[in-house]
Every structure is written in C-alpha cells, then in structure tokens.
Image: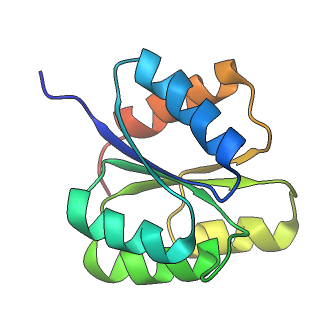
Amino acid sequence: MKKQKILVCEDECDSREAIKNILTKRNYEVYTAKDGKESIEKAREIKPHLLILDIRMPKIDGIEVVKEIRRFDTKVKIIFLTAFQSPQLSKEAAKYNIYDYIVKPPSPHYLIKAVGDALKQKKS
C-alpha cells in the first residue's frame, strides 16, 4: 500500500520537525516547507493528500496559500495550524473547505487523530 503524503508548512523549525517526526513514526510520507511560497511550490510538485498549514508565515500567509493551492488542487485535505483561535478563522476555514484547525503546540495524540480523521474522510 502506498504511503499517504503529508506536507507540513510551518515557519518555526522546531515545531515543523516535531510534527514531521510524529507523523513519520506513523508511517506517513512527510514533506516540509518553511514559508508560504515554498508551501505552494511543494504542494504543486508532490501533490500531497493532506496539508498541515500554519496560518501566520513569512512571505505568504496561510490563507493566501490556501487560495492559491485551491486553484490547482480542490481535493487536498487541509488542517490549519494556529496559535490563536478566532471566529474569523472559523469563517475562513469554512470558506476554503478546511478540514480542521489545531491550536499550537499540538498534542501528539490530537495531531495523529486529526490527521487520521482527515485522511479517512471521503473526497469532496
């Protein structure tokens, strides 16, 4: 069985590597990006099944990244990663078909559950 591809887009190196390590141990094929621009380039190149995307990043923020990625991939599941919960975030998430959002730093248990649930969900 082919491994499912996940792209982790997070500008904080320690957080990015921690998420990568957790998911790699669960047998996912994990790629990383350090900013919004790199996120778009890698998403276009590797065509991930799931994107874990920080909202506040340098160069291009997460909302702009989603807008751009949705132009070429309407099926990829997306989980927002944020330090702040807000009603505005919920509105944005609904507008762009975001599967979930996780508050940073994510607990390994919640991260694994959210990723598993997102990847099991039927494509819309």
Q: Residue at x 62, y 55 (%)?
A: 10
Q: Kindly identify the residue that appears in the image at 71 percent across and 52 percent down.
A: 12
Q: In which quarter of the image is the N terminus?
A: top left
Residue visible at 57% across and 83% down in the picture: 64
Seen from the viewer's position, the closer of residues 12 and 100 is 12
- Residue 61, horizontal then vertical, whole percent: 65, 77
In the rendered image of this protein, does residue 1 appear above or below residue 74? above
Relative image position of residue 37 (x, y in whole percent): 48, 77
Outermost residue to the left: 1
- In the image, taking residue 112 as reference, residue 86 lies left or right, namely right
Quarter occupied by the C terminus: bottom left
Q: Name the residue rendered at 30%, 61% in the picture.
A: 75
Which of the colour schemes (rainbow, by chain, secondary structure, one colour) is used? Answer: rainbow
Badge count: 0
Give the quarter of the image for residue 73: bottom left
Quarter where residue 83 is shown: bottom right
Compared to residue 43, the image places residue 65 above or below, namely: below
> At which x and y percent is residue 32?
46, 50
Q: Residue furthest front?
A: 13
Q: Position of residue 101 (x, y in %)?
A: 67, 50
Q: Which of 7 and 90 is in front in this view?
A: 7
